[in-house]
Amino acid sequence: MKTKTNSVTRTIRTFDFYVLLFFLLSFIGWLWEAGIYLVKDGTWINRGVCLGPYLPIYGAGGLLLWFLLHRLHEKKWLTFLLSAAVCSVVEYVTSAFLEWKWGMRWWDYSGYFLNLNGRICLLGAVCFGIGGMLLNCYLMPCYMRVYHKILPRRRFGLCVVFLLVFVCDAAYCAVSPNRGFHIAW
């Protein structure tokens, strides 16, 4: 019986570790993109498909980077290069999917140096490379320290709340995505 309890506890810890990390990275991505437009246009813009303060592409991309690159945390240049490549593929595929699904683009890099069909560009790849290196080499050790200081019941409760809000938001936005000012081209 004790083995089964330990297995369930490990599963819940793994579950809440990744769910909380997903929402943290999604929120950081949302702040990053909203901050860019705040500086560039002097206005606060929710850049996401969803209405909430998160960009799931950053959460999913960050989790993918962690799964793929966590063993390379001491090799900063390799982490940078692989992060740039992986995130560029994720960004390109996501852009194509969003355009196919809703017939619009949420970003367009056509005017940027070394862009590919306006979906990705060199500057974006460099930014994602830096972001992936920062995530893997610096943010994750901090995240793990904070994560382990939060009681397991509280972590699980946060996961439930975040997931309920996200599922409701995603369901609503699947029908009526955020198409506000400066959202799509």
Image (spheres, rainbow, N blue to C red):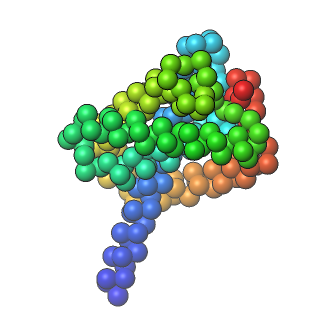
Residue 84 vs residue 19, the one in the foreground: 84
Looking at the figure, which quarter contains the C terminus? top right
Q: Position of residue 165 (x, y in %)?
A: 64, 50
Quarter-of-image position of residue 138: top left
Residue at 65%, 46% in the rendered image: 97
Q: Is residue 165 visible?
A: no
Residue 132 vs 148, above or below: the answer is above
Looking at the figure, which quarter contains the N terminus? bottom left
Q: Is residue 175 visible?
A: yes
Q: Position of residue 101 (x, y in %)?
A: 73, 47
Residue 100 vs residue 34, the one in the foreground: 100
Quarter-of-image position of residue 75: top left
Residue 86 vs residue 158, the one in the foreground: 86
69 on left or right of 163: left
58 on left or right of 70: right
Quarter-of-image position of residue 117: top right
Q: Position of residue 145 (x, y in %)?
A: 29, 46
Farthest residue toward the right?
A: 176
